[in-house]
Image (cartoon, helix red, strand yellow):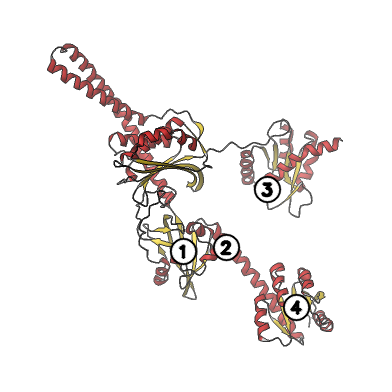
């Protein structure tokens, strides 16, 4: 009886007559025997040619059938059927490690052999489908920005995605089998209050410690108990392995099969940066409103104060000899002068600060102001510096940033009337802005003075000269596209964090041997693809010309002034337009998009990334002078 489908079979048997008999039976069933081999090494080498491998468990040599089957499964992903006559239980138990797809007992019966082969191949297809689906699901989970923890029915970790590893600090292998409450540690309260900056770091740089918050109810346990989705309370905090706390949002949901729960999924996201950014936006809005109000009001007051001072001068001139009146008039003049100074400072909020930005080093700026800071703090405050050598540079007005530092130091000293400690430090940080990570240089001032409400230090409601100075600092930092926050530290002290955008040197743009930007012609009928590649190539310093088809490409090639360095097109289109393009642009390189394997450097196989396309074009243009000189010789 012929099988429904013929399969390629590799026979691994070290007894020649048995191997010949198995091969004959397989061929009688309509299968193709690709080879009969006697050793494990030969089996591993030839397994790629077969659809299925029939493997004797006991083979001569140092490597037996069990080890060979494991290697074949790992290297070639081929199903293995074990051949056995009277294997003992220990051998069969060991054979299970290689994950065989069945056993065939010698001597072989044709019906049993055929059934075993079909069953093994069917199981192999199912396994490959499951593996493929698992790869898809794992990739999807790893691409999700939220942390995802999958648990069994007892709340023990089965899997963490990359975001969960990053947020919790736990690696997947170490977390597996751990209670979810140990890995995703949630607190019911925040001992520091919701005043931290975008980094959400609760570790105290001055070395103090604090009491942890109380543990929260296990959301996984609640989700399984309620048999429904459980949203995480907005006041919850997650504690990472490094002790860093962060506010989180998310939910837990039971996983059910046949109506019964078999586990749960806990999703969570770090929202500390988002909440901090929301506070910064609210703060900026308040300052903008204050600026508009103070500018209008101060101008009105300045006009009135001018009248008061004028009239006081006239009165002083008229009653200058009368002592009681003179004293009162002079007090009016002094009060008017002080009020005018305050009004002018208020007016400064309504106008942009004139600045002269330059690329500066925060480390260098702090070193230059060290003596000034020492003179401000005095002997009762212990000042120390912790400068990260790799801290990036910023583009800012050095005088304004220095003024901001001095104002923050003065405020810190005012909160420590009996002395204390102060740490000034720098570092590179990255924070999310509108969903994307942006690099900043951080200058932080940590001090032992306590602030009753750090978040309101930059509020317009702050009073006195010190409050006005902090408002000016916030305004200056905002003018530099930076962020400024105040927060309590773990020990009850306080900390200012000033973040300024890191300056990155403009990239060296590509240039041809004549010093111009390379010109590339892209031929593609898809508008979205042309737009994406246009933006990408332009951002990397290339002049990208676009054409939707061959006729448009020829027209662009005719009207383009100057040399054309490269053309990117489908292979068939490239071949059709190459003669006409090269008549006008003899040095143009052609990069052909192909569906099959690449045969030359002038081909790129689809699918490809935009970065791979750029690198291939760059290599073609870079190699052109060498080819031209070789042709000339």
Residue under label 1, please give it. Answer: 183
Q: Local crowd at mark 4 within 10 Å, few (<14), some, or many (≥20)?
A: many
State the image coordinates of residue 533 (x, y, percent, origin top left). 64, 43
Sequence-wise first label, 4 or 3:
4
Q: Considering depth in this image, is 441 or 234 the residue closer to the camera?
A: 441
The residue tagged 3 is 612
Q: From mark 2 to mark 1, how far is it between C-alphas?
A: 20 Å
- At mark 3, the secondary structure is helix
Q: Which mark is residue 54?
A: 4
Mark 3 vs mark 1: in front:
1
| Residue 376 placement (x, y as % from top left) | 36, 34
Estimate the x, y position of residue 622 in percent, counting from the top left: 74, 39
> In percent of the image, x 68 and y 42: which residue is there?
548
Identify the residue at horizontal 18%, vertical 19% (top origin): 329
Which badge, 2 or 1, is on the more N-terminal residue? 2
Q: Is residue 106 left or right of residue 149?
A: right
Percent from the top left, x then y, of residue 162? 54, 59
Residue at position x 45%, y 39% from top? 482
Is the residue 329 above or below the residue 491 in the image? above
Q: CA distance from mark 2 to mark 4?
A: 33 Å
Q: Seen from this angle, which residue lies furthest front?
A: 379
Say the numbered circle drawn on residue 419. Answer: none
Closer to the camera, 281 or 361? 361
| Residue 168 shows in this picture | yes
Q: Find numbered disc 1 in the image and state the secondary structure of the residue it sits on.
A: helix
In the displayed structure image, the side of residue 105 where residue 221 appears, left or right = left
Name the residue beneath numbered marker 2.
Answer: 138
Pick whichever of labels 3 and 1 is earlier in the sequence. Answer: 1
Q: Quadrant of residue 339?
A: top left
Q: In the picture provided, is 344 more to the left or to the right than 361?
A: left
Q: State how far apart marks 4 and 3 are (Cα).
A: 43 Å
Q: Distance of mark 3 from mark 1, alpha carbons?
A: 39 Å
């Amino acid at each position: 009886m012929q099988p429904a489908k013929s399969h390629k079979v590799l026979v691994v048997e070290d007894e020649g007559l048995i191997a010949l008999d198995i091969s004959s039976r397989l061929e009688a069933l309509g299968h193709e025997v690709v080879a009969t081999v006697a050793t494990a090494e030969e089996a591993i080498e030839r397994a790629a040619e077969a659809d299925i491998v029939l493997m004797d468990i006991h083979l001569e040599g140092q490597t037996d059938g069990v080890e060979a089957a494991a290697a074949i499964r790992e290297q070639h992903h081929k199903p293995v059927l074990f051949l056995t006559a009277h294997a003992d239980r220990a051998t069969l138990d060991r054979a299970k490690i290689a994950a065989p797809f069945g056993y065939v007992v010698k001597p072989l019966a044709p019906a049993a052999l055929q059934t075993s082969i079909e069953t093994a191949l069917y199981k192999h297809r199912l396994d490959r489908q499951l593996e493929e689906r698992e790869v898809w699901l794992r990739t999807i989970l790893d691409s999700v920005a939220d942390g995802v923890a999958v648990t069994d029915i007892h709340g023990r970790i089965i899997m963490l995605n990359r975001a969960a590893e990053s947020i919790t600090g736990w690696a997947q292998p170490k977390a597996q089998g751990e209670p979810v409450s140990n890995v995703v540690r949630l607190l019911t309260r925040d001992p520091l209050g919701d005043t931290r900056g975008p980094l959400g770091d609760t570790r105290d740089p001055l070395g103090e410690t604090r009491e942890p918050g109380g543990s929260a109810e296990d959301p996984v346990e609640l989700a399984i108990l309620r048999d429904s989705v459980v949203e995480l309370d907005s006041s919850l905090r997650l504690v990472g392995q490094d002790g860093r706390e962060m506010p989180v949002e998310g939910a837990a949901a039971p996983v059910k099969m046949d109506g019964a729960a078999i586990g749960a999924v806990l999703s969570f996201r770090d929202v500390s940066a988002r909440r901090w950014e929301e506070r910064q936006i609210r703060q900026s809005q308040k300052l903008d409103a204050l600026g508009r109000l103070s500018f209008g009001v101060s101008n009105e007051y300045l006009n009135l104060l001018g009248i008061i001072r004028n009239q006081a001068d006239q009165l002083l001139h008229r009653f200058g000899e009368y002592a009681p009146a003179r004293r009162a008039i002079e007090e009016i003049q002094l009060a008017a002068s002080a009020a005018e100074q305050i009004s002018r400072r208020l007016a400064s909020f309504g106008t942009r600060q004139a600045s002269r930005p330059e690329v500066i080093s925060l480390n260098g700026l702090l070193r230059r102001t060290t003596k000034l800071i020492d003179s401000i703090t005095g002997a009762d405050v212990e000042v120390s510096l912790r400068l990260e050598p790799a801290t990036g540079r910023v583009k800012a007005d050095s005088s304004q940033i220095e003024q901001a530092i001095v104002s923050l130091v003065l405020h810190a000293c005012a909160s420590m009337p009996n002395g204390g400690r102060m740490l000034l430090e720098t570092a590179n940080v990255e924070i999310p802005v509108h969903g994307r990570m942006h690099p900043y240089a951080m200058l932080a001032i940590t001090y032992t003075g306590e602030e009753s409400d750090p978040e309101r230090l930059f509020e317009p409601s702050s009073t006195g000269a010190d409050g006005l100075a902090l408002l000016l600092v916030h305004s200056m930092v905002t003018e530099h596209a930076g962020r400024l926050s105040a927060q309590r530290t773990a020990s009850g002290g306080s900390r200012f964090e000033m973040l300024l955008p890191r300056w990155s040197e403009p990239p060296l743009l590509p240039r041809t041997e004549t010093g111009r930007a390379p010109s590339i012609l892209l031929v593609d009928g898809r508008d979205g693809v042309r737009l994406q590649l246009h933006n990408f190539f332009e951002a990397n310093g290339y002049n990208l010309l676009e054409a939707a088809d061959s006729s448009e490409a020829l027209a662009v090639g005719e009207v383009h002034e100057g040399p054309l360095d490269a053309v990117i097109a489908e292979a068939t289109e490239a071949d059709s337009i190459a003669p006409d393009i090269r008549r006008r642009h003899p040095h143009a390189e052609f990069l052909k998009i192909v569906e099959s394997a690449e045969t030359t450097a002038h081909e790129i196989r689809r699918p490809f990334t935009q970065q791979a396309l750029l690198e291939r074009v760059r290599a073609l243009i870079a190699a052109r002078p060498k080819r031209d000189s070789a042709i000339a010789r």
